[in-house]
Structure formats: structure tokens, C-alpha cells
């Protein structure tokens, strides 16, 4: 084997595993990696903040199924990137955070910027370790990728001492990693068919990690063949075309109450992929613990999630891909017994996503002046305008309730939203999407609070020609917290008001296009201009601050 620097071994390993982009904020601790990237072909996106770089890596992992790579420097860089590690863990997204570390010769002295990376990230990541010798880098890197992509995917954090990266080695490369995706036994499928055969009110709950176009197509096939209703878990709305007669809506933070009721009333739940966590179970209220009233089939790639809280009648330790392919290969169970149940689920969904006409319930019809932007109508317009493969990214805030409800996802890999509910995710995720899919339209929707957590990445967008459209939902407040505040401490507003900059001017200062949209009617034309700007573009959407959630006003909250 020829002699290579440790940094070159790292870069060769990423490339061998199909990782064609990396996101970083540079540091002097990993110059050897930067140097190995100098001559390509791996695309390096240098960002303005490690939190954003880490979020981009999470989004890359979610979109490609390969680990998203984030390169940061020791203490200050790694700690700023930590939000991405947490999000990757909660999102079951494969990710590799590579941290330049102080040299081995001074390790343990609390040297400048030193951080005990395995100790800090151990409980948060799927695995965290530190390189000890350049000759063992191939072994370490192969294990890191293997752990990140196998079973329930997740983040791996590696500390790479500066001298290990700078030293040379003749170590041979490891082989590219093949993900281990646990599969299904024939007996499991026989039992699934038996349970379905005895059911009258079955409901599939789909989501979680490991989806692909093929898995999404298989879900559609099995669901429609047996006329099964399908609910999707929080922020997994793109695993089934929302136009399918089987699609019944999402079990997100502000789920349709009729859908929540349907989960309670079901006699069989086939949970394909998601964890049965706080949000999917509406705070552990839709199922009784540990023995649910509904019969439960739980399919999850992580062994630790099966029977973690709810004891299933049938637990299948499988990734959704192999599970759905196997399900599709057996004859469908006839769905006549529950045809009306499925149709009712679909009707509930269609009624739920119909935007209010005109000014909607939050604006008095007699209010003077033009109506401010109505987010329900804006999302419906966005859905009409964008092609099926466009990517929509968002972060956290009440504005996401409108995205989840009124934008319809039609293809797998088009929804990028953190299952961890982390603010500041939308813009970085959109930029990663543009790296992965340069020809697709990519739209980030962000709250005014949310957006300013990673707004500096507009510079990254302009520098790297990542032409995304950003919709800032400007209501002058941290709306979610304001809503909780008004509920718990009515009228006592503390810490939730926002005095915002001129977002459109800010965008223009970065070299992006920027425009304020103050009237509902102006949105479609402004969207058209933003999509055709030929550079990143931002629309500052002035919404009515009274409209605190779909169909709910601040004053109504206060009166409660
Ligand atoms: C990183 C992070 N910090 C704080 C929170 C708590 N939090 C959840 S939503 C929210 C307000 C979001 O405000 P904005 O983006 O303006 O959206 P809005 O609710 O007004 O639509 C806050 C502070 C969080 N989820 N993530
Ligand atoms: Mg806001």
C-alpha cells in the first residue's frame, strides 16, 4: 500500500462509501483532512456555524441513506455541532461527526480546546470513539460507518487527533461498508396475515428510518391492495403519496383529532418503522402501556425499540424495506371488512386539509385593509406550484402545523423536518437537499425565531450557488412558547415577543433576492419570482399574529 496521510485515509474512506459531500467549519486541528479534500472529488461545503453544518449532515444522511459527514474542530466546534448529533439520534439518521482533536502527545492535560469527545458524546451518539494510531484508521472508520447505517441508523462521533491525521501510514483501506438491515421470517408474515384476517378496524402507522422509493412504493401497493388506512408518524409524511386513497394523515404534534380517535378505536395497529414515542402516541395516551388495547404489530430495525414500552402481539426486528418487500410478496388479505372504515379515515383527512376560504376564522371579514398572508392558503399554493419531487424543509415552531397540514407530500424524500423539534434546521437542511438534488426546487419554511438561529447560512447558499427559496413566517414572536404561555399564564407575555430585522433587506445584504409579502393575494406571484430568481431567494411573509395555530386565535386562548 502506498504511503498516505491519516487525513487522506479518512477522505478515501468516505469516497469508497459513496459519500460525495461533506459539511464543515474549518479548524487547524484537521488541516490534513482539508488538504486531502483539496483535489476533489468530494464536495466540501464550508459553513458559517457548526450547528448548521451538522444539520446539513443530518439532512444529507436522511436523503441518501449514507452517513452525512460533518467536520469540526475540537471543543468549540464539536460543542456547537452537538445539536446535529442529538437530532440525528432522534431522527435515526446516519451521520458522522469527525472532530479534529489535540495531538496525542498533549492529550489529557486540558490542552488548548481539548474535549473528551467520547465522554461528552457517548450518551448522545450511537457510538463515540477516539483514534489512537494512524495504522488503525481504516478499522475505526469502517466500524463508524457500519454502526451509523446498520439496524436503527444514527450518529457516530470520532475524535481524530491532529498528529494521527498528519502522520503517514501504509495501512490498506477497509472494504466499503454494507449496511446490515434486519429482515423478516416467513412465520412473521403468516402471523401478520392471520392478525389482519381477524381484524375489523386495522390501521397501519408508517414512518421511522430506512425508507427508499422502493419501500414507499411497496407500502402503497400493500395498503391499497388490502384497502388499509395508513397514518404516518410525526414528520414522516412523505412515505406514502398523500393522494393515495389509503393515506389518512399524520400523527404529529397537532394531529387531526379524528385520526387520534381512530388510533384509539382501531383493533389492530401495524406500526411499520416508527418508534412508539411521545408524539406518535400523543403523549402516550393513544395506547395503554405496557399492554395496548389494540392488537399491536411493531416493526422496527432497532431491537431496543421492540417492547421498550408497548408489548407487541407480533414484534418484527426488521428494516421497513425488507419488511414491506416481504409483505408485498404474499397474497393480500381482502379488505372488504374494513372498506367503510378506510373510506371514513380518508374523508376525515380530506376535510382536515381543506384550507379555510377567504380570510379564514382568525380574521374578521370586516377588518380594514387587505388580508395578511394566510399560511394555509400559502401552503396550498406552494403544493399547487411545486413538482412532486420538490423538497420542503422546516425547523420547529407553530408555523410547521400549517406545513404539516396543508402541504401535501407526494414522493418519498421530499420532507425534511427534525423529529427532535430542533429550531434552526430548515435552511441548513434545504441547502443539503440542494447539494444532493441540484435540479429539484427546494423550499425552506422557517419561523421568524427559527430562521435567525441559522440565517447566517444565507452566505453559504450564495457562495456555493445553492438556490433555495426561504419562506420566513413572520409573526413577531416565538409563537409556540407564546401559545403555551397564554394557556398557562394568560396575558403575561415574557420573553416571547420578537423585534425582527427587515428580513428581505437582510437577504439582499447577503446577495440573495429578498421580498416582503404583506398581503395574501401577493403570495403566488412572489413565489414565482423567488423560484425563478436564479439565486437564493427569501420571502418575508407577514402573517396575522392573532393566528397562533390553524383555527386558533391568541384572544380565544386568553379567554379560555
Ligand atoms: C433549538 C431550540 N430552542 C428552543 C426551542 C423551543 N421552542 C420551540 S418552538 C419555539 C418558537 C418558535 O418560534 P418561531 O420560529 O418564530 O415559530 P412560531 O412558533 O412563531 O411559528 C421555541 C423557542 C426549540 N424547539 N429548539
Ligand atoms: Mg414566530
Image: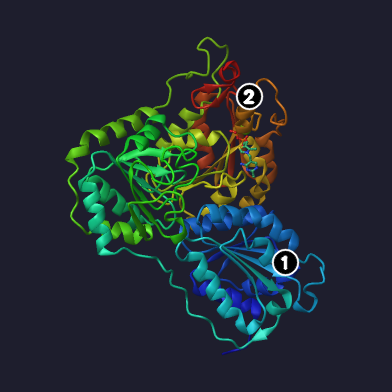
Horizontal placement of 3 versus 153: left or right? right
Q: Quadrant of ligand 2?
A: top right
Q: Return the x and y of residue 28 as percentages of the image width and height.
A: 75, 69
Foreground residue among 409 and 181: 181
Q: Is residue 412 above or below residue 281?
A: below
Asked which quadrant contains residue 9, the reply is bottom right
Residue beneath label 2, please?
486
Q: Quadrant of the N terminus?
A: bottom right
Task: Say above or below: 178 vs 67.
Answer: below
Give the camera-side residue of 550 and 14: 550
Left or right of residue 167, residue 375 in this image: left
Q: Residue furthest top?
A: 366
Q: Position of residue 100 (x, y in %)?
A: 70, 69
In the rendered image, which quarter is residue 189 located in? bottom left
Residue for point 34% across, 64% down: 183
Label 1 sits on residue: 116
Q: Is residue 463 visible?
A: no
User: Residue 408: x and y, percent?
Assistant: 40, 39
Crowd class of label 2 (few under 14; some 14 to 19; many from 20; radius 10 Å): some
Q: Nearer the viewer, residue 313 or 133?
A: 313
Q: Can residue 109 be seen from the camera position used here?
A: yes
Where residue 144 appears, as percent x and y from the top left, is 55, 70
Q: Secondary structure at mark 1?
A: loop
Residue at 69 percent of width and 31 percent of height: 496
Mark closest to the chain's N terminus, 1 or 2? 1
Counting other residues with Cα less than 10 Å from the Cα at mark 1, is it few (<14), some (14-19), or many (20 or more)?
some
Amino acid at each position: 500500500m502506498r504511503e498516505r496521510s491519516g487525513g487522506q485515509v479518512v477522505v478515501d474512506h468516505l469516497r469508497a462509501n459513496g459519500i460525495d459531500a461533506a459539511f464543515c467549519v474549518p479548524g487547524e486541528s484537521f488541516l490534513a483532512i482539508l488538504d486531502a479534500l483539496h483535489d476533489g472529488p468530494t464536495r466540501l461545503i464550508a459553513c458559517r456555524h457548526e450547528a448548521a453544518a451538522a444539520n446539513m449532515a443530518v439532512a444529507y444522511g436522511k436523503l441518501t441513506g449514507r452517513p452525512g459527514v460533518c467536520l469540526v474542530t475540537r471543543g468549540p466546534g464539536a460543542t456547537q455541532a452537538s445539536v446535529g448529533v442529538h437530532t440525528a439520534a432522534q431522527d435515526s439518521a446516519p451521520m458522522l461527526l469527525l472532530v479534529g482533536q489535540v495531538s496525542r502527545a498533549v492529550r489529557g492535560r486540558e490542552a488548548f480546546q481539548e474535549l473528551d469527545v467520547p465522554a461528552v458524546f457517548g450518551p448522545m451518539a450511537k457510538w463515540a470513539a477516539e483514534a489512537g494510531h494512524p495504522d488503525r484508521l481504516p478499522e475505526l472508520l469502517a466500524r463508524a460507518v457500519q454502526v451509523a447505517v446498520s439496524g436503527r441508523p444514527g450518529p457516530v462521533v470520532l475524535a481524530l487527533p491532529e498528529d494521527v491525521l498528519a502522520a503517514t501510514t501504509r495501512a490498506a483501506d477497509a472494504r466499503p461498508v454494507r449496511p446490515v438491515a434486519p429482515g423478516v421470517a416467513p412465520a412473521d408474515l403468516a402471523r401478520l396475515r392471520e392478525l389482519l384476517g381477524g381484524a375489523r378496524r386495522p390501521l397501519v402507522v408508517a414512518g421511522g428510518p430506512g425508507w427508499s422509493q422502493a419501500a414507499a412504493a411497496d407500502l402503497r401497493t400493500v395498503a391499497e391492495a388490502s384497502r388499509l388506512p395508513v397514518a404516518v408518524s410525526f414528520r414522516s409524511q412523505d412515505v406514502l403519496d398523500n393522494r393515495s386513497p389509503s393515506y389518512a394523515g399524520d400523527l404529529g404534534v397537532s394531529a387531526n383529532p379524528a385520526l387520534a380517535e381512530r388510533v384509539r378505536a382501531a383493533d389492530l395497529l401495524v406500526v411499520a418503522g416508527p418508534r412508539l414515542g411521545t408524539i406518535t402516541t400523543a403523549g402516550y395516551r393513544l395506547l395503554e402501556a405496557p399492554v395496548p388495547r389494540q392488537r399491536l404489530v411493531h416493526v422496527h430495525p432497532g431491537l431496543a425499540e421492540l417492547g421498550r414500552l408497548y408489548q407487541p402481539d407480533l414484534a418484527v426486528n426488521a428494516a421497513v424495506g425488507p419488511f414491506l418487500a416481504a409483505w408485498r410478496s404474499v397474497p393480500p388479505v381482502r379488505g372488504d371488512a374494513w372498506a367503510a372504515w378506510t373510506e371514513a379515515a380518508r374523508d376525515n383527512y380530506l376535510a382536515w386539509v381543506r384550507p379555510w376560504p377567504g380570510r379564514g376564522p382568525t380574521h374578521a371579514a370586516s377588518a380594514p385593509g387587505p388580508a395578511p398572508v394566510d399560511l394555509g392558503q400559502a401552503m396550498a399554493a406552494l403544493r399547487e406550484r411545486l413538482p412532486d419531487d420538490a423538497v420542503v424543509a422546516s425547523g420547529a415552531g407553530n408555523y410547521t402545523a400549517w406545513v404539516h397540514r396543508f402541504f401535501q407530500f407526494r414522493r418519498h424524500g421530499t420532507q425534511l423536518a427534525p423529529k427532535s423539534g430542533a429550531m434552526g434546521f430548515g435552511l441548513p437542511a434545504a441547502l443539503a437537499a440542494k447539494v444532493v438534488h441540484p435540479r429539484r426546487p427546494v423550499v425552506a419554511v422557517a419561523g421568524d425565531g427559527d430562521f435567525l438561529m441559522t440565517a447566517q447560512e444565507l452566505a453559504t447558499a450564495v457562495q456555493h450557488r445553492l438556490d433555495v427559496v426561504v419562506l420566513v413566517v413572520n409573526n413577531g414572536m416565538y409563537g409556540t412558547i407564546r401559545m403555551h404561555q397564554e394557556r398557562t399564564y394568560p396575558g403575561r407575555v415574557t420573553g416571547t415577543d420578537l423585534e425582527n430585522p427587515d428580513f428581505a433587506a437582510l437577504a439582499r445584504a447577503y446577495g440573495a433576492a429578498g421580498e416582503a409579502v404583506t398581503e395574501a393575494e401577493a403570495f403566488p406571484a412572489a413565489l414565482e419570482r423567488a423560484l425563478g430568481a436564479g439565486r437564493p431567494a427569501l420571502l418575508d411573509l407577514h402573517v396575522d399574529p392573532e393566528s397562533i395555530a390553524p383555527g386558533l386565535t391568541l384572544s380565544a386562548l386568553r379567554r379560555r
